[in-house]
Amino acid sequence: MSESPDVTVARRILFVCMGNVCRSPTVYGVFRDRLCAAGLLGEFDLDSAGTHGYHTGTAPDERSQAAARRRGFDISDLRARVVEVEDFAFYDLIFAMDDDNLEWLQAAAPEEHRHKLHLLLEFATGQAGRIVPDPYYGGPVGFERVLDIAEEASDALLLRLTKKAGPKDGPA
């Protein structure tokens, strides 16, 4: 995992999974909520995308939406899209949910932007090898697990991105 020297300046963040209907929109929704609660939403530009276009234009999986709603997160406004070449230049950080998505991103990204690519959990929590498991073909427990992970990662990511901010701007 490579890392930019000062991640506290990263304000454009893209979350990526395969179809962009379960994991990446869930993480996006939880992180958006955390930013809103911290009064920082306007300082960030967030999006989610997929490595494959299976669901382009559709709302997140109904099971993801239902699980998110039960915890107070609304992701119904999101629509699936595919990662575009312009994303690599625009976003400061691009987070893959698993190794396959990271490998796809590494192959697609121009070399000068590959340093922006990370596994979400390695970057946010420092736990090497941890992935956000895909709940698409499983039962309700998988969607709850993704939310558990999204909450943990969002808390850690917010802390990491704001750790050098002053007391007025966020956690020290």
Image (cartoon, grey):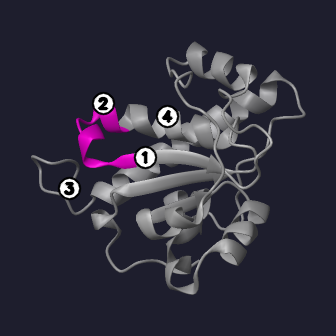
Amino acid, disc 4: Val
Q: Residue at the location (77% across, 52% down)? A: 52
Instruction: Report the front residue among 90 and 64.
Output: 90
Quarter of the rendering occupied by the N terminus: bottom right
Residue at which label 4 appears? 30
Q: Mark 4 vs mark 3: which is more N-terminal? A: 4
Amino acid, disc 1: Leu
Residue at which label 2 appears? 37
Q: In this view, does 108 lie above or below 79?
A: below
Q: Mark 2 vs mark 3: which is more N-terminal? A: 2
Q: Does the magenta-highlighted stretch encompass residue 41?
A: yes
Helix, strand or loop at mark 4: helix
* Most distant residue in the left direction: 168
Q: Which mark is residue 46?
A: 1
Would residue 18 be found to the left or right of residue 91 on screen?
right
Quarter of the rendering occupied by the C terminus: bottom left
Question: Looking at the image, do the residues carrying marks 1 and 2 touch, with CB atoms under 8 Å apart?
Answer: no
Q: 10 Å neighbourhood of mark 3: few (<14), some, or many (≥20)? A: few
Q: How far apart are marks 3 and 1 (CA)?
A: 23 Å
Q: Mark 1 vs mark 2: which is more N-terminal? A: 2
Q: Mark 1 vs mark 4: which is more N-terminal? A: 4
Q: 10 Å neighbourhood of mark 1: few (<14), some, or many (≥20)? A: some
Mark 1 vs mark 4, foreground winner is 1
Q: Residue at the location (66% across, 16% down)? A: 66
Residue at which label 3 appears? 172
Q: 10 Å neighbourhood of mark 4: few (<14), some, or many (≥20)? A: many
Q: How far apart are marks 2 and 3 (CA)?
A: 16 Å
Amino acid, disc 2: Ala
Q: Does the magenta-highlighted stretch encompass residue 88?
A: no
Helix, strand or loop at mark 2: helix
